[in-house]
Amino acid sequence: MLQRIQTVWIFLAILGAIFLFFTGQDFSLFGAIPFVTIACVALVLLGLLSIFSYKNRKRQILLNLISIIINALLLGLLAYWLLNLSGGINFPEKGIEPFFPFLSVICLFIANIFIRKDDRLVKSVDRLR
């Protein structure tokens, strides 16, 4: 059942985390702690675990909600970091990092909608038996 539409949305959220991993290497808010790198690896692992737990829809929704929370925290931290960067608004290095967690949050919300729709469909078929 890997060919479902929610798998595509979760995969797009994983791609957002991978792109953030490559673009967010210059993020330094807490000193030497590579927070973005750790969060991106965790998001990729959670996404892959969510994709391959397609038989347990409740676990899949829970893993997506945990990923949404991590992405929301990343979005807040990246926005705070961008506001504190020197160089003003026209600084060419500003701007793309918060887009990827935002995109991932949207993709995971859409995936959860489709997972719930599948859950309702399976429950309605079970009632007919």
Image (tube, rainbow, N blue to C red):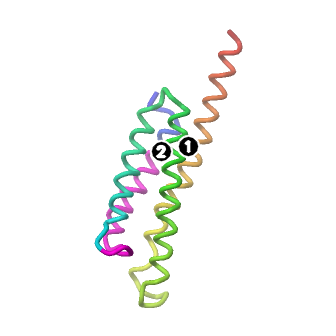
- Specify the quadrant that holds the C terminus: top right
Q: Residue at x 52, y 39 (%)?
A: 6
Q: Using the image, determine if residue 73 lies above or below residue 32.
A: above
Q: Using the image, determine if residue 120 lies above or below residue 98.
A: above
Numbered label attached to residue 111:
1
The picture places residue 46, in percent across and down from the top left corner, at 41, 45
On the picture, is 51 further left or further right than 120?
Answer: left
Question: Given contact means CB atoms under 8 Å apart, are the residues at marks 1 and 2 in contact?
Answer: yes
The picture quadrant where one finds residue 124 is top right
Q: Residue at x 53, y 60 (%)?
A: 72
Q: Amino acid at mark 1?
A: Ala
Q: Residue at x 37, y 64 (%)?
A: 36
Q: Which portion, as a residue range, is magenta?
A: 9-31
Residue closer to the observer: 124 or 59: 59
According to the picture, the residue beneath numbered tag 2 turns out to be: 10
Numbered label attached to residue 48:
none
The picture places residue 9, in percent across and down from the top left corner, at 50, 45
Name the dominant secondary structure of the magenta segment. helix
